Image (tube, helix red, strand yellow):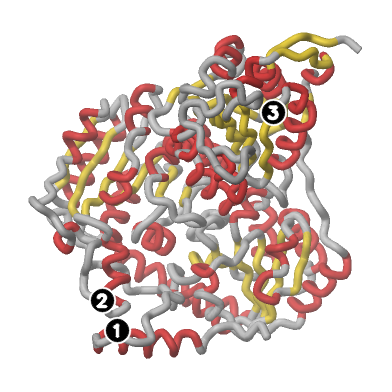
């Protein structure tokens, strides 16, 4: 057996460069490169190895470890999990800064390879700088924080462990059912240690996609249920996108008349104006989709874990027979569903064949078309505004942005009130045009996520919509976007605080408290010049006092040569009343405030709508 002597870090990087996949008929490296913030724990070992491979395996420098991991995750999401990126940090704070991003990837089932530096395996200089010491367990380090938020975790304490750890990591990243973040905590002394690795370990390897067909009996049960249904509904989740099943979904819907509602992750699998589209579903859903869900006797959820926003906290279709089509067995059995364990595209194609002679009743399709006509009128009304509208609603800003960017632009958002408004109101015309992180609803994802989307699709306009609260939590990758020439259009909606939570707080009976800046303790009024701040990071920036100026600023931003931030003040009280559904937010049973007691009564009425799983 021929061997080559390499450090463990050199071996890791060389192995990463040899892992290939086929995307759109072209063989490419699965890993598009590495994000790295070097420091104590990775600069000498991995830093040297990445430098040696910098032409074949690019390395990008970010400004925040969480931010760069968000960018890597967004890249994988936008490319429908077909490719991924690597993130490496120092030990200690560099590593723990990535834990939030790991949790985000875990919740959203997205692949990213995290390689934080770790303590000395030899323990020669124990404790090293930044080392976390557990007085009861000598094996613990800061990287143990990654264990509950990683699909696969390993600590590399000997160079030869890479021979097993790396293929295991790749298997998880490429597994449709087990996909998620992988953490390889890399002891810093081991990174620099040499080993005689088999040369064939570094031979190029092609990782094919895996598609699991459904069990015949489970598929039969679903076909029978649909044939006997009077009012069926299909819910499309992110798994439809990751299975590359948009075409199969459209074909099934068109041939059978099945109406389709979309989760946050599934939004855009059909064009907004497709005849079978009912738009968004759930707490932030369209009136058409939610009405169809309430009337449904059979609900088929495809590629979704049916989180509480989708199901209205299990109150939206309490009496329907539920089928879950999913590659992940845990998801397929949720909410007492009848499971159909299998790949979304294969199942949808099989259903189209098995239901070739079946159609949804005409009156159902006619009712859905009428409901969507009514809903689209409500969307148009909510997003309208005159050019001189000052302090507009979020919905009116969304309307102006929608009119002001290309039809195939990608809108990026993550947390606060904007995701709910976008889920209802954004009209997605092109595949991949809607990129929302709402599984973890992570404030601060927006700009870093937009950067990752731009890496994935450099030819498309990427429009980041972000509130002032999220912008203040994490904005540093705006500077990275300028530095790397990845142009973003950032629309910053300044409602002077956390407007979404302020509305929720008041809806549950408590007056505004500690959410808007005006309701928070302050020694002096908070005056933040977002335009000056964005310019200080190298971006262009404008302030829009009304919708007309916003539209003009969008024209400037589209013509600009770098990232641009447009700031507009919005009204924190206004939200779209059309659509939506109940959400389980527990209200105190006992309170001196009559508003809280009234909210509790409404809450108890909502709980009675829940699906009975007994």
Give the labeled residue for mark 1.
Answer: 596
Expressed as whole percent of the image width and height from the top left, the position of residue 334 reads 67, 70
Asked if the residue at tag 3 contacts the one at tag 2, i.e. Cβ–Cβ closer than 8 Å, the answer is no
In the visual, does 335 lie left or right of 224? Answer: left
Q: Quadrant of residue 230?
A: bottom right
Above or below: residue 217 compared with residue 394: below
Q: Nearer the viewer, mark 1 or mark 3?
A: 3
How packed mark 2 is, by other alpha carbons closer than 10 Å (few <14, some 14-19, many 20 or more), is some
**Residue 35 in view:** no
Asked if the residue at tag 2 contacts the one at tag 1, i.e. Cβ–Cβ closer than 8 Å, the answer is yes
SS for dot 3: loop
Q: CA distance from mark 1 to mark 2?
A: 7 Å
- What residue is rendered at 73% in x and 45% in y? 175
Expressed as whole percent of the image width and height from the top left, the position of residue 14 reads 69, 17
Q: Nearest the camera: 214 or 41?
A: 41
Asked if the residue at tag 3 contacts the one at tag 1, i.e. Cβ–Cβ closer than 8 Å, the answer is no
Q: Quadrant of residue 76?
A: top right
Most extreme residue toward the front is 135
Q: CA distance from mark 1 to mark 3?
A: 55 Å
In the visual, does 53 lie left or right of 91? Answer: right
Quadrant where the N terminus sits is top right
Q: Nearest the camera: 33 or 601?
A: 601
Give the labeled residue for mark 2.
Answer: 510
Q: Earlier in the sequence, mark 1 or mark 2?
A: 2
Q: Nearer the viewer, mark 2 or mark 3?
A: 3
Expressed as whole percent of the image width and height from the top left, the position of residue 494 reads 22, 51
SS for dot 1: helix
Q: Earlier in the sequence, mark 1 or mark 3?
A: 3
């Amino acid at each position: 057996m021929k061997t080559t002597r390499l450090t463990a870090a050199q071996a890791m990087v060389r192995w990463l460069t040899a892992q290939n996949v086929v995307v759109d008929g072209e063989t490419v490296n699965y890993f598009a490169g590495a994000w790295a913030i070097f420091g104590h724990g990775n600069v000498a070992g991995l830093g040297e190895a990445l430098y040696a491979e910098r032409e074949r395996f690019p390395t990008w420098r970010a400004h925040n470890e969480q931010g760069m991991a968000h960018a890597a995750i967004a890249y994988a999401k936008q490319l429908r999990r077909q490719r991924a990126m690597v993130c490496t940090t120092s030990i200690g704070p560099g590593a723990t800064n990535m834990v939030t991003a790991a949790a985000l990837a875990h919740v959203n089932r997205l692949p990213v390879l995290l390689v934080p530096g770790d303590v000395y395996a030899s323990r020669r200089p124990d404790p090293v700088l930044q080392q976390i010491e557990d007085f009861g367990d000598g094996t613990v380090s800061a990287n143990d924080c990654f264990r509950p938020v990683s699909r696969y975790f390993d600590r590399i304490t000997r160079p030869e462990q890479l021979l097993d750890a790396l293929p295991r990591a790749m298997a998880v990243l490429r597994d449709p059912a087990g996909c998620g973040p992988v953490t390889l905590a890399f002891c810093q002394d081991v990174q620099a240690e040499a080993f005689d690795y088999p040369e064939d370990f570094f031979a190029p390897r092609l990782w094919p996609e895996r598609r699991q067909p459904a069990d015949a009996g489970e598929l039969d049960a679903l076909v029978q249920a649909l044939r006997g249904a009077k009012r069926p509904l299909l819910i499309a989740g992110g798994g439809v996108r990751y299975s590359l099943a948009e075409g199969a979904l459209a074909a099934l819907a068109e041939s059978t008349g099945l109406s389709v509602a979309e989760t946050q992750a599934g939004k855009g699998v059909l064009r907004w104006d497709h005849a079978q589209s009912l738009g968004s579903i759930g707490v932030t859903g369209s009136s058409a989709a939610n009405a169809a869900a309430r009337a449904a006797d059979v609900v088929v959820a495809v590629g979704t874990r049916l989180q509480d926003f989708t199901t209205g906290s299990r109150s939206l279709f309490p009496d329907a027979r539920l089928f879950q089509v999913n590659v992940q067995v845990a998801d397929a059995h949720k909410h007492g569903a009848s499971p159909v364990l299998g790949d979304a595209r294969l199942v949808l194609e099989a259903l189209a064949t098995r239901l070739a002679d079946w159609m949804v009743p005409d009156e159902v399709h006619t009712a859905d078309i009428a409901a969507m006509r009514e809903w689209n009128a409500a969307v148009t009304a909510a997003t309208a505004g005159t050019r001189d509208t000052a302090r507009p609603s979020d919905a009116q800003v969304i309307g102006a942005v929608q009119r002001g960017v290309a039809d195939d632009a990608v809108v990026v958002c993550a947390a606060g009130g904007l995701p709910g408004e976008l889920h209802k109101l954004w009209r997605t015309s092109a595949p991949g045009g809607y990129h929302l992180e709402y599984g973890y609803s992570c404030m601060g994802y927006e700009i870093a996520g937009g950067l990752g989307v731009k890496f994935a699709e450099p030819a498309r306009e990427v429009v980041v919509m972000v509130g002032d609260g999220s912008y203040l939590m994490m904005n540093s990758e705006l500077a990275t976007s300028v530095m790397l020439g990845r142009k973003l259009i950032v629309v910053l909606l300044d409602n002077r605080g956390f407007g979404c939570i302020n509305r929720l707080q008041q809806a549950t009976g408590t007056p505004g408290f500690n959410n808007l800046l005006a309701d928070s303790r302050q020694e002096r009024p908070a005056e933040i010049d977002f335009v000056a701040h964005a310019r200080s990071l190298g971006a262009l920036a404008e302030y829009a006092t009304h919708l007309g100026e916003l539209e003009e600023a969008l024209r400037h931003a589209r013509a600009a040569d770098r990232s641009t931030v447009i700031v507009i003040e919005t009204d924190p009280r206004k939200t779209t009343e059309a659509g939506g559904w109940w959400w389980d937010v527990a209200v105190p049973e006992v309170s001196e405030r009559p508003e809280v007691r009234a909210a509790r009564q409404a809450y108890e009425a909502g709980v009675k709508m829940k699906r009975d799983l007994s």
